[in-house]
Image: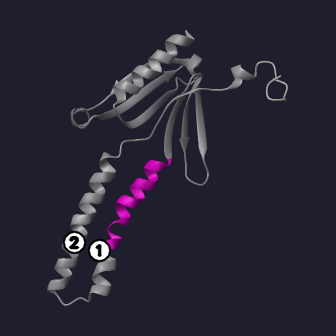
C-alpha cells in the first residue's frame, strides 16, 4: 500500500520510459522565414516606387510570411518518439494518426544523408522491421540522425 491506495501488481512495469522525442529539422523553416522577410521588405520598397498605398503594400508583403508558416505548421504535425518498447510516429494536426513499431520487430537501423544534408547536419533514419510486407519506416530530415540512430540501437540491444 502506497499513499493509502493499494498498489496493483505489475503497475511499475506498465509505465513506458521515453528515450527521445524529435521532429524534422527547422533549417528549412528558418531559411523560409528569412527569405520571406527579405522578399516582403523588397516588395514594400518596390510597391513604394509605384504609388501604392502602405495599407495595401504592407499586408501584401506580410502575406508572403504565410508560405513558411504553412511549412512550419506541417513540420509540427510530425513527431517521432522512441520509448523503451517502441518507436512511435505521430502525424496530423486535428486528426492524429499514430504508428507504433515495437522494438522487438526492428531488424535494422540505417542513417541516410546526401552531401548537402551532411553539410547541414541532418538526414533520414531508416528503420527496417519484420513485417509481412517488409516494412520500412523513415524518420525524415532529422537533425543529428547518427545520434538518434545510436540511441535507437542502444535500446535495441536491451531487447535482443
Residue at 45% in and 17% down: 153
Query: Quadrant of the rendered structure where residue 72 is?
Result: bottom left
Label 2 sits on residue: 41
Query: Residue pushed farthest left?
Result: 49
In the rendered structure, which segment of residues is drawn in magenta? 61-77
Cα gap from disc 1 to disc 2, whole angstroms: 7 Å
Q: Quadrant of the N terminus?
A: top right
Identify the mark nearer the N-term, 1 or 2.
2
Compared with residue 35, is residue 6 higher up or lower down, i.e. above or below?
above
Residue at 80% in and 29% down: 3
Crowd band around label 2 with a 10 angstrom C-alpha radius: few (<14), some (14–19), many (20+):
some
Query: Residue pushed farthest top?
Result: 160
Q: Evaluate if marks 1 and 2 touch, with contact meaning CB atoms under 8 Å apart.
A: yes
Crowd band around label 1 with a 10 angstrom C-alpha radius: few (<14), some (14–19), many (20+):
many
- In the rendered image, residue 59, in percent from the top left (x then y), is placed at 34, 78
Label 1 sits on residue: 61
What kind of element bears circle 2?
helix
Task: Verify whether residue 94 appears in magenta.
Answer: no
Amino acid at each position: 500500500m502506497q499513499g493509502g491506495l493499494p498498489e496493483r501488481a505489475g503497475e511499475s512495469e506498465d509505465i513506458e520510459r521515453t528515450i527521445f522525442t524529435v521532429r524534422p529539422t527547422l533549417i528549412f523553416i528558418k531559411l523560409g522565414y528569412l527569405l520571406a522577410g527579405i522578399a516582403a521588405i523588397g516588395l514594400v520598397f518596390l510597391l513604394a516606387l509605384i504609388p501604392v498605398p502602405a495599407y495595401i503594400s504592407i499586408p501584401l508583403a506580410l502575406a508572403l510570411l504565410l508560405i513558411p508558416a504553412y511549412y512550419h505548421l506541417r513540420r509540427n504535425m510530425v513527431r517521432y518518439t522512441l520509448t523503451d518498447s517502441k518507436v512511435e510516429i505521430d502525424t496530423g494536426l486535428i486528426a492524429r494518426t499514430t504508428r507504433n513499431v515495437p522494438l522487438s520487430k526492428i531488424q535494422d537501423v540505417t542513417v541516410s544523408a546526401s552531401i548537402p544534408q551532411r553539410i547541414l547536419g541532418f538526414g533520414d533514419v531508416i528503420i527496417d522491421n519484420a513485417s509481412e510486407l517488409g516494412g520500412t519506416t523513415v524518420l525524415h530530415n532529422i537533425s543529428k540522425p547518427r545520434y538518434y540512430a545510436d540511441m535507437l540501437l542502444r535500446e535495441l540491444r536491451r531487447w535482443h
